Image: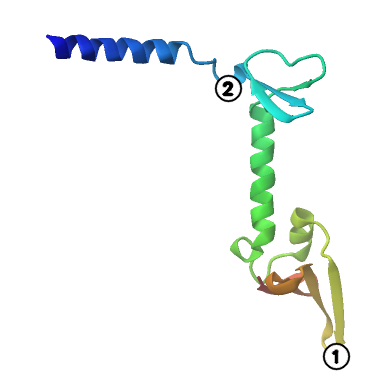
Amino acid sequence: MKRVVLRWGGWVGFALLFASSPAAAEGYFKCETANGVEYTDTRCEDAASRQDFPDQYEREQRRAEQRRFAVCFRPSRVFSPGDSASDLAELCGPPRRIRRLTTPDGVEERWEYRQGPGALFVFVEKGAITAIRD
């Protein structure tokens, strides 16, 4: 009998604790104060500015931006030789540097998107991607 009461009391205590917890994420406020960012379930003080959590549209926009960044970080996962270089430039923006080499066959370009040890090069000839090194 004592175990049943303790178990029942434990569940009631847990339920009360859960019921007294703050509302869902939409009920919170992100307040910027002099001490930094604080999250509360009440409105921000007068000296703090209220910032709503992002709505569904903003979250989708951020996810799309993250996917675009991932594609531009490793374009070989999406683009392959023969694809249009203008599609890559439209998605990832202009390269940091373009180096042109004129040969008897035409002009070859090396588009550089990142520098340093993780350099990303896209080789372009006649508007088409010929190779990607990422």
Give the vertical position of 6 relative to 125 (above or below). above
Q: Residue at x 85, y 72 (%)?
A: 98
Question: Which amino acid, mark 2?
Answer: Ala
- 5 or 26, which is in the foreground? 5
- Which picture quadrant has residue 97? bottom right
Secondary structure, mark 1, is loop
Mark 2 vs mark 1: in front:
2
In the picture, the quarter occupied by the C terminus is bottom right
Say left or right for 43 vs 13.
right
Q: Which mark is residue 104?
A: 1
Q: Nearer the viewer, residue 17 or 65?
A: 17
Q: At which x and y percent is residue 1?
A: 12, 9
Number of numbered discs overlaid on the protein picture:
2
Image coords of residue 50 (percent x, y): 76, 20
Q: Position of residue 39 (x, y in %)?
A: 65, 24
Give the residue displayed 67% in from the left and 29% down from the top. 57
Q: Identity of the amino acid at label 1?
A: Pro
Q: Residue at x 29, y 15 (%)?
A: 10
